[in-house]
Every structure is written in structure tokens, then in C-alpha cells.
Amino acid sequence: MIPKVAIEKAIEGGWNDRLYRVDMGNRSVWTHSEALVLDPAFWQALGRALGWEEYHWKHDRTTQHRFYDLVLTGGDTEAYWNELLKV
């Protein structure tokens, strides 16, 4: 649900991903990626990496709410991320 590039961008923006990884021996896997979007630090770090103004990620929750609405209504989250990340 959350593309790897979004997670990488958030890490680039300073987000700490350690709480969301599980060591599976020879590889790490992401767990419960849906939980990532509930972490305000994830959105703030993603915003920094994408060059959003501080106001946008601290006060304008439209970006996050659009994603939540898509999840709740079964919308196209892939298109959402493609648009947001410009891929």
C-alpha cells in the first residue's frame, strides 16, 4: 500500500524507520505499512524530502486526509502515490 520510494523519501527527510522493520534473518521486511501513515513523523519527513513548506505538513492535512479517504473507500492508492511522488 505504501510504495518503497515513499518510505525511502521519508527516511531521506529524517524519519526513523526502525520501529517498522522486522529482521527476518537474511532480509528485513516492512511490517504493517498501513501504520506508517498514522505516524506524523512519517508525513513530516516525507514533506521535508519533497520540499513542502513547513506550513503544509504541520497545518494542512489535506494530503494525508486524501490518502486516508482513499483507503477507507477502496480508492486507487497507487495513483495517489504516483501523483504525490511524481513518478
Image: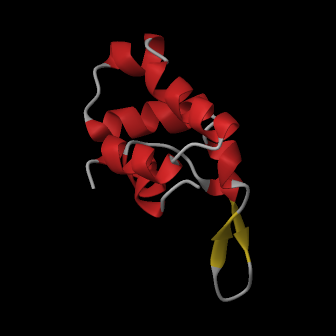
In the image, what residue occupies the spot 64% across and 55% down?
Answer: 18
Q: Nearer the viewer, residue 28 or 62?
A: 62
In the image, what residue occupies the spot 55% across and 47% down?
Answer: 16
Q: Nearer the viewer, residue 16 or 61?
A: 61
How has the structure been colored for display?
secondary structure
Q: Nearer the viewer, residue 5 or 69?
A: 69
Q: Is residue 32 left or right of residue 43?
A: right
Q: Residue 35: in sight, yes or no?
A: yes
In the image, what residue occupies the spot 64% across and 83% down?
Answer: 27
On the image, the x and y values in percent for residue 33 come to 65, 54
Q: Is residue 47 left or right of residue 16?
A: left
Q: Is residue 83 above or below residue 29?
A: above
Q: Is residue 2 left or right of residue 62?
A: right
The quadrant the C terminus occupies is bottom left
- Please identify the quarter of the rendering in which residue 21 is found: bottom right
The quadrant the N terminus occupies is bottom right
- Please identify the quarter of the rendering in which residue 24 is found: bottom right
Q: Nearer the viewer, residue 19 or 83?
A: 83
Q: Residue 38: in sight, yes or no?
A: no
On the image, the x and y values in percent for residue 42 come to 53, 38
On the image, the x and y values in percent for residue 68 come to 61, 32
Q: How many marks?
A: 0
Q: Is residue 73 above or below residue 61?
A: below
On the image, the x and y values in percent for residue 63 come to 44, 27
